[in-house]
Amino acid sequence: MISVQSFFDLDDFPDPGLFQATSPVWQPLNDLKTYMENYSYPKYEQSFFKDGVPLKEHIIIHKGQMLCSDDCEIEFGNTTKKGLQVKQAGTLLEGASVIMAGAVILGKQLAIGKGVLIETGAMVKSPAILGDYTEVRQGAYLRGYCLAGKRCVLGHTTEIKHSIFLNDAKAGHFAYVGDSIVGNDANLGAGTKFANLKFLPGNIRVFYEGKWLDTGRRKLGAVLGDGCQTGCNSVTSPGTFMAKAAILMPNTTAKGGLHQEKTIIR
């Protein structure tokens, strides 16, 4: 079986309950909606933002409370390296997160960890869970059911829907990530696209050990194991499984199916 434990190290992932070690590696996507709909979300003060209306000023989130930024000093350092710093009257608000003016939030099912930055022009549709020190860059479009672990980058003009980012996963620029899982320390080159729907009807299947396995999913993008990389302007076909440390070269389309550890796809 192409199992979760063969693709990912979950020792430090903040939402390990979504993954079962011996389950098929695509199983977390089957369970994602139920997991996120039953998640215990913090009750942020809704007066700070209205659905679909760009924020008029920066919002600070500290210890579960939303604060106005009028009397705060913000240093926009490297978010994933804990460089986002907020001071109020000279006092450091350790672990404070920032939603910048111009960002758009839709829905109330939103969980934001410590030191998170959501930049101007990003649109976040709930439900969304953003782990500690994650950065949502300008123009990012989170279409719902997006779960990111620690120190992730959800990048500039990157569209993400019904997907999971494990710790330190990064899609920095111009990517499409739909119905996919991006493993620990995996990195997507600029312009990476994960195709998630076949032209022909029927569930996506994968050939493994002499037989076809039915994923049970009509839509399934890519599953990248820990340490995988994709080059700029690369594309994965629906149902692409890249095991740990596999590499997809730039301007290359990966065929659907299993690509073994440390494979270089040309």
Image (tube, rainbow, N blue to C red):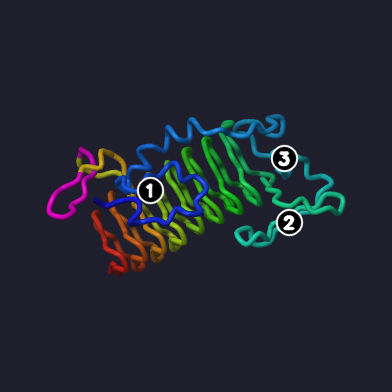
Which residue is disc 3 drawn over?
56
The Cα–Cα distance between marks 1 and 3, rounded to whole angstroms, is 33 Å
Span shown in magenta = 201-213
> Residue 189 falls in which quadrant of the image?
bottom left
Can you give x and y, in whole percent of width and height, for residue 152 in the image?
53, 55
Q: How many discs mark residues in the rendered view?
A: 3
Which residue is disc 2 drawn over?
85
The first of marks 2 and 1 along the sequence is 2
Identify the mark at residue 180; answer none if there is no mark. Answer: 1
Q: Is residue 122 left or right of residue 183?
A: right
Q: Give the class, few, some or many, for how many residues have Cα within 10 Å of label 3's Cα (few <14, many ≥20).
A: few
Q: Which kind of residue does numbered mark 1 sit on?
A: Ser
Q: Is mark 2 on a helix, strand or loop?
A: strand
Q: Is mark 1 on a helix, strand or loop?
A: loop
Q: Which kind of residue does numbered mark 3 sit on?
A: Lys
Can you give x and y, in whole percent of width and height, for residue 192 in the image?
40, 58
Residue 53 sits above or below residue 85 on the image:
above
CB contact under 8 Å: marks 2 and 3: no
Can you give x and y, in whole percent of width and height, for residue 78 in the image?
64, 62
Magenta stretch contains residue 49:
no
